[in-house]
Amino acid sequence: MNPPLRISFRNMNRSAAVEARIEQKLARLQHHFPQISACHAALERQHRHQHQGRLYHVVLVLTVPGSEVVVSHVSHDERAHEDVYLAIRDAFDAAERQLEAHSGRRRARPARDDLLQADAAAG
């Protein structure tokens, strides 16, 4: 089941190819993290910088049980984000890392709660 996907474009024209790439990346991400229930991808073409071309900024908001994971990835190599497809790739890579961390925290929480309950029962 594919989660609902909303894509917004700012300062750039809507592109079927870009939308297809985002759908592809989301499908791959959901394969690893099926708990994703919704996704909003916002793409923005920033204004021209003096020494660089136009840069793309991608923000992802992924809804998972109990919270949202927000990715606003900024590359250390800004020139890489002169290509919208590289900006999308980097944002989804960052989302994958954040979801792995989020999943790890959710798994660790019950163990900690069990310890607190055991301490309460003993004391």
Image (tube, rainbow, N blue to C red):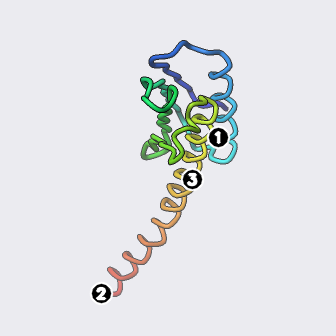
Badge 3 crowding class, 10 Å Cα cut-off, few under 14, some 14 to 19, many 20 or more, is few
Q: Could you say which disc has been placed on residue 68 in the image?
A: none
Circle nearer the viewer, 2 or 3: 3
Q: For the C terminus, which image quadrant? A: bottom left
Q: At x 40% / y 80%, what residue is drawn? A: 118
Question: At x 48% / y 27%, what residue is drawn?
Answer: 42
**Looking at the picture, which amino acid does disc 1 mark?**
Gln
Judged left or right of residue 118, residue 84 is right
**Residue 123: which disc?**
2
- Disc 3: which residue: 97
Give the mark nearer the N terminus: 3 vs 1: 1
Q: Are marks 3 and 1 in contact (CB under 8 Å)?
A: no
Residue name at image x 57 percent, y 53 percent = 97
Residue 112: name its quadrant.
bottom left
**Residue reaching furthest to the left:** 123
Q: Quadrant of the N terminus?
A: top right
The residue at the point 53 percent across, 63 percent down is: 107
